[in-house]
Image (tube, grey):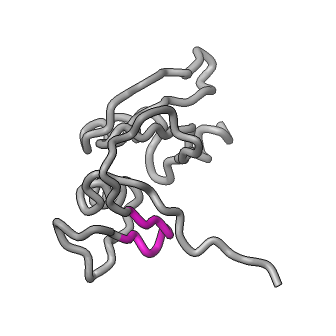
Amino acid sequence: MTSLIRHVTIDSLDPYRLASFWSEVLGQPLHEDDFPGDPEALIEGAGLLFVTVPEGKAGKNRIHFDLQPQERTRDEEVDRLIALGAVQVDDQRRPDGTGWVVLADIEGNEFCVERSAAERAA
């Protein structure tokens, strides 16, 4: 029999705060039992588990998320995520509309925002 991935676990200095950021990004609620100060926090619908570790992020992510906006354009989503606290790290957008934007979440974890399906189809 094979295995399945139950959660993707993300190390964090403040799991509740980081999970709250990603909850807003993904439009998925935190688990009902999670509160500020908890040593872990779960976004159950996304399978993301945030756990406390004592050390901060030390280098480049070995894994990252590539987000595809569902109801907005790539540029509108980038603006929304920056308003939530993300920071732009790199801009790979091209004049023809292709490309992506690299952002970092509130603890410095990089992720990319690609074009929406509607933008790809146009």
Q: Nearer the viewer, residue 84 or 77?
A: 84
The image quadrant of residue 22 is: bottom left
Which residue extends farthest right? 1
Q: Residue at x 50, y 70 (%)?
A: 47
Is 92 above or below relative to 55? above
Q: Residue at x 49, y 21 (%)?
A: 91
Residue 41 placed where, x, y %? Answer: 32, 69
Q: Nearer the viewer, residue 115 or 8?
A: 8
53 lies left or right of 112? left
The image quadrant of residue 107 is: top left
Q: Residue at x 27, y 60 (%)?
A: 20
Per the rendered image, the range of residues in magenta is 42-50
Residue 66, magenta (yes or no): no
Residue 89 placed where, x, y %? Answer: 42, 25
Q: Residue at x 63, y 71 (%)?
A: 5
Which residue extends farthest top? 95
Look at the image and tell me in which quarter the N terminus lies: bottom right
Residue 13 placed where, x, y %? Answer: 28, 51
Disc tally is 0
Is 91 above or below relative to 85? above
Look at the image and tell me in which quarter the C terminus lies: top right
44 lies left or right of 3? left
Is 51 above or below relative to 4? above
79 lies left or right of 45? left
Which residue extends farthest left? 36
Residue 67 placed where, x, y %? Answer: 52, 47
Q: Nearer the viewer, residue 49 or 100?
A: 49
